[in-house]
Image: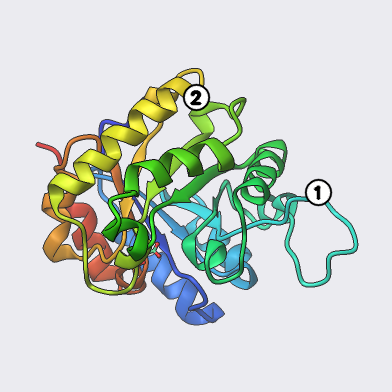
Amino acid sequence: MRPTRPIVLGNWKMHGLRAPGVALARAVAAGAGPAATLGVFPPATILHAVAEALAGSTVLVGGQDCHHASQGAYTGSVSAAMLADAGATWTLLGHSERRHGLGEDDPLIAAKARAAIAAGLGVVICVGETEAEYVAGATLERLAAQVEGSIPADLPADRLIVAYEPVWAIGTGRTPADAEIARAHAHLRALLGRRLAGGEQVPLLYGGSVKSGNAGAILATANVDGALVGGASLDAGEFLAIAAAGARV
Ligand code: PGA
């Protein structure tokens, strides 16, 4: 079911040693109210400590990526079962810093999604156009290709969240116009409805330079069910202010 309150997730990326990470998680939990569903995605090394600190709270905990195999000779990699064992219930997949920074393609992301679901996790799959694609007017086409390529058609819709993150908006302070976000999200809603059983109910998050100052308008946009927040999620006050900005009265 589409959520009745916004889902606001914090992607900590490669930030966070154990003590400050646990302190950040505790501050988020202390400020979590009924207005939004909150989640944090810390680095794998502190996942367990953060999950322990959040035990008994309503704040979700997830990994930032997982390997596509369940185990094996993959030096340096983390499997979905390892994330779950450390206390994660969700994982991000297909973030642009992995698609574009590390060359991950749609079939690999689809394989990771299958592995994560098999390990009992929910998946937040990120999609979004590059700046060149945006300028060329190819956003909707790109989203269709990424949905088709990286979201397996048999994925259980109730364990999927899709984040629309224009690559050019991530960490840049630039965001699409509200109407462009609405258009992309309406497109994703229709694509997912055709692709998955119950797919029209999949929560759709916007991500890319979300701050407390723009969150109210973004979270009020049609078909936006929440936000995936990077930089601003490293400050508990700012992260909580984003969630508060999305409160539906
Ligand atoms: P940003 O990152 O909020 O720092 O732009 C968003 C993301 O990468 O998920």
Nearer to me, 110 or 18: 110
Q: Nearer the viewer, mark 2 or mark 1?
A: 2
- Please state the horizontal and vertical placement of residue 186, each as a whole percent of the image: 27, 33
User: Horizontal placement of 54 versus 209: left or right?
Assistant: right
CA distance separating discs 2 and 1: 26 Å
Tell me the quadrant of ligand 1.
Answer: bottom left
- Please state the horizontal and vertical placement of residue 218, each as a whole percent of the image: 17, 50
Q: Is mark 1 on a helix, strand or loop?
A: loop
Q: Residue 70 carries which label?
A: 1
User: Horizontal placement of 171 versus 241: left or right?
Assistant: right
- Rendering quarter of residue 117: top right
Q: In this view, does 42 lie above or below 37?
A: below
- Please state the horizontal and vertical placement of residue 78, each as a whole percent of the image: 73, 62
- Rendering quarter of residue 248: top left
Q: Which amino acid type corresponds to the residue marked 1 in the rendered image? A: Ser
Which residue is labeled 2 in the image? 195
Nearer to me, 130 or 249: 130
- Ligand 1: does it lie within 8 Å of the C-beta at label 1? no
- Please state the horizontal and vertical placement of residue 233, each as a whole percent of the image: 34, 67
